[in-house]
Amino acid sequence: MIKHVFLVFCIVLILTGCGGSGQSNPTVAEGGSFVMVINWPKPRPSIPNSSQSIVIAILAGSKQVAQQIVVRPNGGQLQTTTPFYQLPVGSLIVTVSAYPTTTGTGVAQATGQASLQISPGVRTSAAVSLDSTVATLNLNPSPLQVIPKSITTVSLSALDSQGRIVLLSSAAGQDQVTWVSANSSVASVTGSATSATITAETVGNTTVTASYVLTGLNQTISASLPVSVSNATGLANTAWPKFHGNAKNTGIGIGSGAIGIKKWSFQTGDVIISCPAIGADGTIYVGSADHNLYALDGTTGVKKWSYPTGDIVYSSPAIGADGTVYVGSNDGVVYAINGSTGQKRWSYKTGSNVYSSPTIGTDGTIYIGSEDGFFYAINGATGTKKWATSLSYIDSSPAIGTDGTIYITARYGFYALDPGTGKTKWSIGLGGDRSSPAIGADGTVYVGLADSFYALDGATGATKWSYYATWPVYSSPAIGADGTVYVGMDSETRSYVHAFDGATGALRWTFTAGVGLVMSSPAIGPDGTLYVGSNDMSLYALDSATGNQKWSFLTGGFVSSSPAIGADGTVYIGSNDGNVYAIK
């Protein structure tokens, strides 16, 4: 705790006929008085630099018997003398609080108290030590992942023990905030009491430290910010960095143990079809039809930032190895957003809505489709187009095979593309609107096309097996560790989840959900729990071996979003009620 110390001189007198603003107990026949002398010096930190007033209160037990507000005077080293009259004789307490306003309002910046013994005819004095109310400094974002030559703004807030923001001084003097980078050759920093600018120079790691310093008392409160400057490419190594969890879209997570209890929810301004992605620090990234991409604290659900696009964000974000978040919008633009700060790095304009969710290649290339009929390869660092291949209307999301082959569903066909050139390796003339492919361990590609579900040879496109679904397949398949394939399907009256033997196509089990479509794509935890949303407004947790329901969670709208599984087993999903839910 930081202390600001000044003397309070208390002079107890017997006054006849004296009254004033301090009078509060007229029944006292012979009261006492004291005078508080406040020093406002610049050379020593007696009072915080940004404090504009002092509130002095006199207490008899829990009852306040007097109070005065003393406004900071203009000028140099000055004193303020504040008298109190007609105080009751006996043991009292004087409290002193420093505030950033001239009216004694806001959050106190420093507080202290001392005991007073008021005796008639006796002069007394007391010393009051002011403790700074600053308990912690918060830096946001923290940690920070950036690329070389980037400039990032970091905000600083000082909080008291109750989590309230305490105003700090931005001027040099008694108390101030200082910023230091442990390795300025990696990243340099300049800052004030509320923010700092961090300039990334070269690849490496450093720590930036913000300190609230009182030079006269040689006391400090500090907070540290890890900064990583990296040219890393490819998909981030997190619990769930993109739609369906990985570049092959297998829908396998690393966390387990959810039991169906809401941890938190966050209300956006419109429906959520976008699937959440999870950053290295647990941040949840998700789009909303209210035109925004959101970054939420994965533990609390508190919004870190939001980025406004020009239209609906149905696309699911993908996180790069350097922390950049890539997402499409129905304004026809693909965005690259700094995952820490929410600042745009670049944008690329296509010719129509971008409903497709991006996939990131090992070299950092962003692969994504547009409803303009083109499939794009975009340089993840610069936002420049590498190539674009004309297919047909695309609103599905690509998967990347072990050899780099890109698989994508378009309106009038399914395609395997060369990652370097975009040229077609093979295609089949069966299209589907929204089912995205998933790739098995042996290279088999599983995908819903029109009203059937297919297992295709990844090298040739030959059909291994198929299942007639009677209704369009919107859900994208998940693939279990044992090769079982899980996918949502529908009939005219009911919705289902099917489990197939991935090698033969034999149906292992069917789970009947409520009335409505299953557009959500299943996700699997390592304990074998299968999570999937339904347009009956529920998220279901199923035993992947039997299809038996473990639990369900009811939202307030259709669940067309697909679940993401956190490292601790928390399941994150959006709903058409506009909420993002964290379910533990």
Image (cartoon, rainbow, N blue to C red):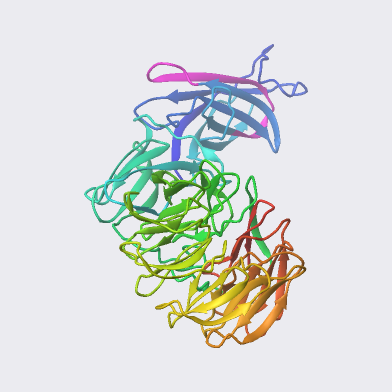
Q: Is residue 529 left or right of residue 308?
A: right
Q: Is residue 546 left or right of residue 514?
A: left
Query: Quick check: is 86 in the magenta stretch?
Result: yes
Decide if residue 483 is in sight here: yes
Which residue is at 36% across, 64% downward? 361
Which residue is at 60% across, 83% downward? 500
Seen as rendered, the residue at the extreme left is 185
What percent of the width, then of the height, locates residue 476?
56, 69
What percent of the width, then of the height, locates residue 385?
34, 51
Establish if 229 lies above or below 403: above
Frontmost residue, 484 versus 107: 484
Frontmost residue, 49 versus 535: 535
Quarter of the figure with the C terminus: bottom right
What percent of the width, then of the height, locates residue 454?
55, 77
Seen as rendered, the residue at the extreme top is 17
Which residue is at 52% across, 40% downward? 310
Residue 63: name its quadrant.
top right
Which residue is at 60% across, 48% downward? 289
Establish if 65 lies above or below 13: below
Q: Report the span colored magenta.
A: 72-94
Decide if residue 257 is in sight here: no
Residue 34: name its quadrant.
top right
Q: Main secondary structure of the magenta part?
A: strand
Query: Quick check: is 96 in the magenta stretch?
Result: no
What percent of the width, then of the height, locates residue 250?
50, 73
Frontmost residue, 191 versus 484: 484
